[in-house]
Image (cartoon, rainbow, N blue to C red):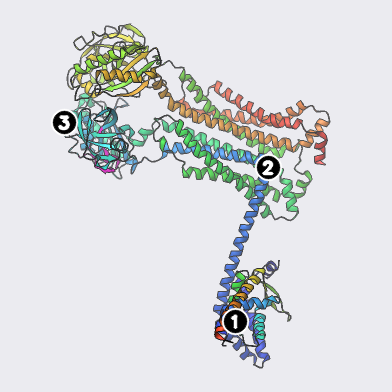
Amino acid sequence: MPAKDRLHGTLDALVLKSLTAGPRHGYAIARWLRDASADRVQVEEGSLYPALYRMERSQWIEADWGMTELGRKARFYRVTAKGRRQLKSETDEFARFVAAVTPILLPA
Amino acid sequence: MGRQLGASLWGASVGEEVEAELDFHVEMLTRELMGSGLPRSAAVDEARRRFGDLRQLSDSCRQIGESREREMRRSEYLRDIMHDLTVAARQLLRARGFAAIAILTLALGVGATTAIFSITDAVVLRALPFPEPERIVTLNEVLRGQPDGASGGDFHDWRTRAGSVLEHVAAGVMQTGFTVTGGDTPELLGGARVSAEFFAVFAVPPMLGRTFSADEDQPGRANVVVLSEQLWKRRFAGDRAALGRTLTMNGVPYTVIGVMPRSFDVASFGDELWVPLALTAEQLDNRRSTFLRAVGRLRGGVSRQGAQSALSAIATDDARRFPDTNANLTFVVNGYADSLVGGYRTRLLILLGAVGLVLLIACVNVANLLLARGAVRAKEFAIRAALGAGRARIVRQLLTESVLLGAAGMTIGLALAYWLVRGLVAISPENVPRLDQARIDGRVLAFTLLVSLVCSVLFGLAPAIRAARGNLEGTLREGGRGSMLGAGRDRLRGLLVSAEVALAIMLLAGAGLLIRSAILLQRVAPGFDPRGVATARMILPDARYHDAPRVADTYRRIRDEVANIPGVTVSALSSVVPMSGSQTRAGIGAADEPDEPGRAIATNFRMVSPRYFAALGVPMRGGRDFTERDDAAAPLVAIINESLARKLWPGRDAVGQQLWGIRGAPGAPRPKLAVVGVVGDLHDASLDGEVAPEFYIPVPQTPAVLWTALQRSLVIVAKTANDASALEHPLRKAVMRVDPSLPLAEVRTMEQLLAGTLETARFNTLLLAALGFIALVLASVGIYGVISYFVSQRTQEIGVRMALGATPSDVVRLVVRRGLTPVLIGAAVGLVLAASVTRVLSAQLYRVSATDPLTFIAVVLALVCVALVASYIPARRATRVDPLRAINVGG
């Protein structure tokens, strides 16, 4: 998992991003991140859940019990307006970071 | 909605939610792994492995979740409170009249009680500014029931033989006359001569330097002085180099050795400076002259009773050893604080009772207002309850309103208390001990605030609880309208009005009795005419005036100079003037009986010049006044007052009789004085006291020993046809013409002195009268509130009655009768209570019985008048009800 370390700082942003399409439970978030990155991003469950609870406390996301398609009770997360603002600022930050390091690491 | 639904339907703790959530994930992962071909057990193991330490993970998630819940609850709570407060403030603003009256009532209750209690506390209850003040005692000898200071012999005995119970014993004598020279003008300072252990008795160390050693408390070595902080700052500008400097007092140099801090407040033992008492061996052996005042410090663990029995044993022993002086003597030990506070204690405790009554009235008032308001809002609560507002929600809203009301009242009350303490201190007489230290007392403030808060919350909630529990439908149907017949609900409010009136009557009766006493006291003939009389004290310093003839001659010259002041009609001298707060006393007897100590009558005496009686307008009842011929060489003479004449020679003419006079020196034979005149009695110490027996001797015949004891001090008494207070400057100039270094002290007019004796009693009366007034105001507010409520609730009925032909005066009568009934009941109860309670005032009353009918009638009339006005105003409003509108309101 080469992307792991850098991923740690951007985990919040990734989780928020995963929720922009609609409410998801924790397993679905992990699944989506893996699928969307074509298996290149693997989020450890041990990091995912504390991050979720932390973000809930920060009121970036809200949680709700609901039913899965399989009729199972699961805790669904939804991004709040505050969470969207947070995602935007982290995305912008990331873009600036990439723009700054790209000419150095990958000179044209 | 979603969050609440989830949390409340699930009803689970954060921990359970975390478990469930993680379980779900593990299971989904297991299925996924099984889907890729793993057998179930391997898939479960793999899924768990990916989670790492599952227990630790769930713990940390639970912790984060729980703190989130806590934060949320807190912010929700704050939001609710803010909301409740906003609503409550809006409600109170809408009911502005109600809120204003309730808040002012609370403010008056809290403010007045706190202020007056704080003053009481400063004067009576607060510990003295000394370490372990309860260990400080006063020691007195008691002759036939009269405490009478201490003699040198007593002091010597206590110091040498009571060591087992008293750690320190000290004696002192106040000395008002320290003439300090060496500055620009001679200055007359007040201080005391005290024995070496004096400062140890109070256990206060000097702030600078040291106090006297036992060595310095010896005749001939006693030229050292300890200054008060105030004098040190004034005279030496607070310079530490003052230590070791010389202060020339009465012509003798004293070395400054120490400075006592301002907190060393022993006003009864001098307040500006202290010099050693330095009793001679002869004085320490004297058992007759009780000129000393003694204090002691109890040993740790020794009770006052313990000290008393030790001193009683010494007294018994002394009676055996010195039968001619100590036969009838006992010693008494009292708390020092008691001696300071004295008569104030009862007065202040009475005030405290009055203050409690006012607080009670205020609470009753607020209770009544809140109940009335609660009844008005019964419909509102019923509707809200019907609309689904929880009972807790309504109660909480009302609680907020009550607390807001209470807080507003308290804030204003606090400001009022602060202002009242300052105001009362400013208008109080000078001589109330420690009054200047009065500060708002935190404990009292807390107490009054608590009482008023509990009161407002309790009675604010009562209607809410009733509404929340009560019959919804009934309340709605009746609509809080009620009728004259359904008056049962008003019974509680009527009862509260009665209670309030009864309390107010008690308070007013007490205040009324004191006011009447004050008026009667004002009319007491003092026995002299204070108008146009100025007085001023002089002290001739020892260094230049040590022989008696020179002293007498100087005073004669001063008297002549004063007589020459334009406008002065009579110029006279006296050792003490009436109402000045000091007295000189001697035991004397008729010379036709043997001179035995047991026969002597304690008698006030004065040395006076000719024309002293003329200056004060005291009538001669027989014989003659002193003349210039009654000098040192002439036969010894005396003038006595009517009381002494009646005592010594009842039914006989006193003129021509003989008295045993004052010894010229200790152990010398008593001289016989021929009574040459009898003068009218006069009130000497205070107007309400008994007139004491008294004798007068001519200034030139003063025994030398008395000149020393009185520091060669006399008072000028000058009568003028003009304004006596304008005499101060001419008097100073007249004295300067005789000796430019002589200062004048205690320059007062007789009218000031007379007023001074009344001031403390007046202050007390004023406080009680103020409280009575507050009670009256509160009671009228209470009556007004209840009647206003009554009128507003009966608008419809009044309208109907008027439509049916009732005249406005019928309506007024109806409403006023309604208001007066509880008032009259309360007044009757109040009178009965007052009659039993005012008895505690007896000692303070002057020629007024504690159940003086005139006062009681006046008080009831005043209250009924106020009640009439308080119910007439809303009654008038009732007559202006428009019948049509009134009926519509209900429909």
Tell me where residue B403 appears, x and y as whole percent: 60, 48
Q: Report the residue that reaches farthest toward the front.
A: A108
Query: Residue drawn at (64%, 46%), measured in percent from left and top?
Result: B460
User: Range of the magenta residues?
Assistant: B193-213
**Residue B464 place in picture, x, y as percent:** 67, 48
Q: Name the subunit of mark 3.
A: B
Does B599 sit left or right of B566 as displayed?
A: left
- Nearest to the observer: residue B820 or residue B441: B441
The residue beneath circle 2 is: B95
Amino acid type assigned to the residue bearing label 3 in the image: Ala
Circle 3: element type: helix
Q: Secondary structure at mark 1?
A: helix
Residue B816 quadrant: top right
* Chain where mark 1 sits: A
Q: Is residue B793 above or below residue B732?
A: below
Q: Residues within 10 Å of mark 1 (few under 14, many from 20)?
A: many
Q: Choose the circle earlier in sequence order: 3 or 2.
A: 2
Amino acid, disc 2: Ala
According to the image, label 1 marks what residue?
A45
- Helix, strand or loop status at disc 2: loop
Using the image, tell me which numbered label, if any, was put on residue B408. none
